[in-house]
Amino acid sequence: MLAWSVLVLFAVRDGVTGALAPGDQVRGILHVLGLGEPLAGNLQAIVRLRLMRALTAGGVGGALGLAGAYLQGLYRNGLASPSVVGVTAGALLGGSLAIAVVGGFGPGLALGVSGVFAPLLVTGSSFLGALGASLFVLWLASSGGRLSVPTLLLAGIAANVFIAGALAALQQLTLNDYEVSRAILSWTFGTLDDRALWQVVLVWSALVAAALLIPFVAFELDLLAGGEEDALALGVRVQRVKLGVLLAAALATAAAVSVSGQIAFVGLVVPHLVRRLTGPGHRTLLPLSLLAGAVFLLGCDYAQRRLLGSVALQPGVLMSLIGGPFFLVLLFRQRRSLSAW
């Protein structure tokens, strides 16, 4: 938590428009919190935009890190993550449909100014898309009470390919509406630009709600690591745990996608890094994946903006460049175990 707080201060201090003086930085943050006078000129707006970006990055990273840890525990395999098994794509499709259909191919909902219910509509559609993709992949990968890892990966690939086709069709249908088409396209890249307070509240509220499940499923996920039959024999209500974990992972992923668009591989990389430091126990893995996800996404975003400046990549593109090779390394290291299925 301390590391994330320090990164927030750095992210507010530095930006493409230049660095803020320490006094201006503190004063600007206090005003955003309602505890002080605003800065003169455009400085206060700059502080607010940078702070909202940093808080959004932390919430999105934490949500995706927690969702990845949930799904890896549920599927009993480190290759699972919201992006790999199609949950992120499902949430993206649901949110895109909400922008296009509910927004009537107009700019209002895409820009977040069509009313107080706009974020709830987008998040609700994202949640349904994430949950639908989760249940579909779980159904395809399960047979006779057993979960096949190769089938899981193939089902995730199939879900991602189908959803990519649906998104391409949606983009073609909305080409004549510049605002909607631009909003949907930017979501596929992921974005942390120009985030508002309601978006920060939305993603952090969903993250807290998903995290509330941790004490109720952490021990059960440890028992599930030995197989569903053994877990049932030890008194674990497997179906209830599965449903609860899927709902929590879908909620966290949906909120992240509805606020920032598609940012892949955070849920794959972060739980692996945490597991190497703390071990496989979910009582520590789940909360630390949340915190590490917040630090990881914010840290990567801040570092690349410091290095690249105005030509910095969108966070979805950056995470794909980091997570894609990471996923290939995991596949290479687990090829023997996968061939045994």
Image (tube, rainbow, N blue to C red):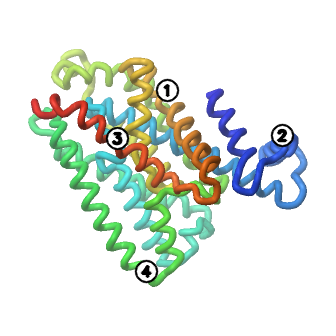
Question: Where in the figure is residue 233, as x and y percent of width and height?
Answer: 19, 17
| Residue farthest to the bottom, as pictured | 176
Numbered badge on residue 288: 1
Residue that label 4 marks: 175
Residue that label 2 marks: 22
Q: In this view, does 188 lie above or below 321?
A: below
Spatial CA distance of label 4 from label 3 is: 31 Å
User: In the image, what residue type sits under mark 3?
Assistant: Ser
Spatial CA distance of label 4 from label 1 is: 42 Å
Q: In the rendered structure, which disc, 2 or 1, sits on the residue that comes first in sequence?
A: 2
> Is 76 left, or right, of 310 in this rendering?
left
Q: Which residue is drawn at 42% across and 56% down?
A: 126
User: In the image, what residue type sits under mark 2?
Assistant: Pro
Question: Where in the figure is residue 134, as x and y percent of width and height?
Answer: 29, 47
Q: Nearer the viewer, mark 2 or mark 4?
A: 2
Residue that label 3 marks: 81
Q: In the rendered structure, which disc, 3 or 2, sits on the residue that comes first in sequence?
A: 2
